[in-house]
Image: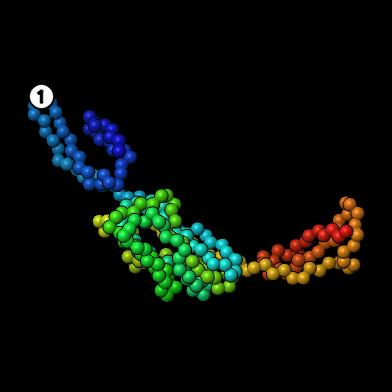
Amino acid sequence: ATYMGVYTPTLKVKATLVTMSGYRYRCRINGLCPFVTTNAVTMTVNSPPIYVTIPPINACAGDTVFVPIVVNNFSQVCSFSLKLRFNGSNLTFAGHKQINPNLPGPGAMMVNNSADTVIMSWTSLVPGTLPSYATLVILKFISNGFFSGSQLIWKTTPAGNCQITNCAAITIASQFNNSTVSVAALPLPYNVITPQPAGGHYCQGDMGVQVGLDNTQLGKIGRASCRERVS
């Protein structure tokens, strides 16, 4: 931290740290007579909010869908409890792929599923701090067909469902951002149909044969065409 105005009526503290919360300050007045001091005031420094986010997820039918839980401002954390709701008609929970190795022990992170809700919890006697935009854990799901915009929703109510605390068991302000999962159908082109007579011989510079890819399953872009040269 940087102190400014030490010898003025106003003291300014810049670049404060969370660890400075609870520091006490008072004014000492000197003159011809013996100095006097004012009463002390206590400074409170709040932690910046922790942001818990999930990027939009896109996958193809049949894929294992990986959902990273990303945190920012994750500092001096000793425990958390998180609940994430998903649509069980679209997704089947299949466990987790990776837990951030920088979470201090001896606490172990627990990841479970109950009633289409992933429950994540972790507790440690040693505070944990992660780099900016760190991946806390990667969840795994199996897609049940293809769909668009299936929601992933943090269950922030009632109180305690999604909660992050420091080692003094004080809740750290946090913001939870919901996301979506979209799974696209695999493209299934129909037989290529060419004008009759098909194929043929062409000279350099000729246009070739236009073939249609109508009614493909994915996207249905109308009529796609390609150029085929047959020698």
Instruction: Give left or right: position of 117 versus 65.
Output: left
Q: Residue at (67%, 67%) from the top-left corner?
A: 187
Looking at the rendered image, the quarter that the N terminus falls into is top left
Question: Where 62 falls versus 27 (above or below)?
Answer: below
- Residue 185 visible, this orientation: yes
- Residue 165 visible, this orientation: no
Camera-nearest residue between 231 and 9: 231
Q: Residue at (51%, 75%) from the top-left corner?
A: 89
Dot 1: element: loop
Q: Residue at (27%, 56%) from the top-left corner?
A: 167
Residue 228 position within the rendered picture, expressed as x and y whole percent measured from the top left: 82, 60
Which residue is farthest left? 34
The residue wearing badge 1 is 32
Instruction: Give left or right: position of 217 versus 159.
Output: right
Which quarter of the picture shows residue 51? bottom left
Looking at the rendered image, the quarter that the C terminus falls into is bottom right
